[in-house]
């Protein structure tokens, strides 16, 4: 395809997949069950952290966690007692277990005591880059002597050369805002133009097929390369093409898996 044909093709795929019909089978359906901003943030974070494996399992485990928190995650995070934490014991999703979960809850409790939104855990001031925001979040998240060493594998950052697929997906949910209703657009300290495209197995496959990605590793530099190329198609909202790239791959293969 020439550049014009490529943009036309991907824009058509965005129209097809960036739609309410996308929500039901995707982990983004989890925060869509809530109305309060903080509930959306908390369940969005967990659903993105759990985004490893089959989508239906990710959704099921996220909803199990919400139920353990009485389907009121913000109230649970803010006001739980030590006895309430017993409801979280035994939770497990792949390598994420209840020890990891208890630390996540502790972090969220500490953060929301000082801040009204989880946005400031990433974008502590306006217009910093996503790379800086993600590195800051990981450092801030583990800035506690009680942070379990094992939990570090569940929060990636560009400093580790990770593509940060799951957290970039979370940022897409929180930051992008259009009239389609898939993403929430509830954060304002960063513009959609600054987002980095989530780079999972499906997006990687389609991007390489279309000549949008050449780096042989699926790391942070690859995510940056892909996003630079997508900005040539839409400088203001490059990450909207996440829908197109993911959707094209799903059309070819129905068994959906997210990779770390």
Image (cartoon, helix red, strand yellow):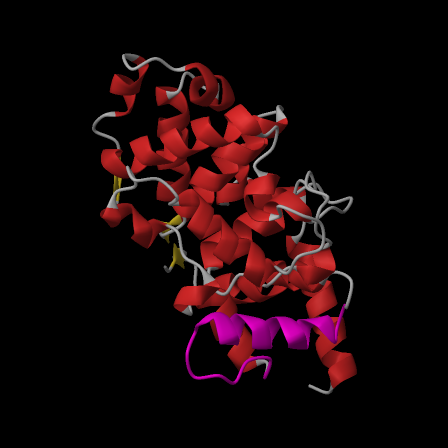
Question: 44 above or below 197?
Answer: above
Measured from the top left, where is residue 86 in percent x and y? 25, 18
Place residue 227 in its image quadrant.
bottom right
Q: Residue furthest front?
A: 145
Taking the spot 73% from the left edge, 61% from the top edge, the residue there is 193
Quarter containing the N terminus: bottom right
**Residue in front for this viewpoint, 6 or 141:** 141
Question: 4 above or below 81?
Answer: below
Instruction: Judge whether residue 200 can be spotted in this image.
Output: no
Residue 160 placement, left or right of 123:
left
Taking the spot 60% from the left edge, 33% from the top edge, the residue there is 117
Place residue 80 in its image quadrant.
top left
Q: Residue furthest left?
A: 90
**Residue in front for this viewpoint, 131 or 61:** 131
Question: 113 above or below 253?
Answer: above
Residue 107 placement, left or right of 4:
left
Taking the spot 54% from the left edge, 48% from the top edge, the residue there is 170
Measured from the top left, where is residue 144 in percent x and y? 35, 40
Measured from the top left, where is residue 241 in percent x and y? 65, 63
Residue 229 is a magenta residue: yes
Give the magenta-colored segment's residue range. Answer: 211-234
Quarter containing the C terminus: bottom left
Residue 216 is a magenta residue: yes
**Residue in front for this viewpoint, 102 or 3:** 102
**Residue in front for this viewpoint, 171 or 212:** 171
Instruction: Judge whether residue 146 can be spotted in this image.
Output: yes
Measured from the top left, where is residue 184 in percent x and y? 66, 40
Total labels drawn: 0
Taking the spot 48% from the left edge, 83% from the top edge, the residue there is 215
């Amino acid at each position: 395809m020439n550049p014009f044909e490529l943009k036309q093709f991907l824009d058509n795929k965005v129209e097809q997949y960036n739609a309410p019909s996308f929500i039901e089978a995707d982990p983004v359906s989890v925060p869509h069950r809530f109305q309060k901003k903080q509930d959306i943030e908390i369940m969005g974070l967990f659903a993105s952290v759990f985004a490893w494996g089959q989508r239906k399992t990710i959704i099921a485990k996220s909803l199990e966690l919400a139920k353990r928190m009485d389907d009121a995650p913000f109230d649970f995070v803010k006001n739980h007692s030590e006895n309430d934490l017993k409801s979280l014991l035994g939770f497990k999703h792949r390598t994420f277990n209840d020890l990891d979960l208890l630390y996540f809850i502790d972090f969220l409790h500490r953060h929301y005591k000082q801040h009204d939104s989880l946005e400031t855990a990433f974008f502590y001031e306006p217009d910093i880059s996503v790379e800086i925001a993600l590195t800051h979040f990981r450092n801030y998240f583990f800035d506690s002597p009680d942070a379990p060493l094992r939990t570090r594998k569940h929060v990636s950052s560009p400093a580790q050369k990770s593509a940060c697929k799951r957290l970039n997906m979370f940022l897409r949910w929180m930051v992008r805002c259009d009239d389609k209703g898939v993403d929430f657009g509830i954060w304002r300290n960063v513009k959609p133009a600054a987002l980095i495209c989530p780079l999972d197995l499906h997006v990687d496959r389609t991007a390489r097929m279309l000549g949008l990605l050449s780096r042989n590793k699926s790391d942070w530099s690859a995510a940056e390369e892909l996003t630079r190329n997508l900005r040539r198609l839409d400088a203001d909202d490059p990450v909207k093409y996440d829908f197109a790239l993911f959707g094209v791959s799903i059309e070819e293969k129905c068994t959906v898996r997210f990779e770390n």
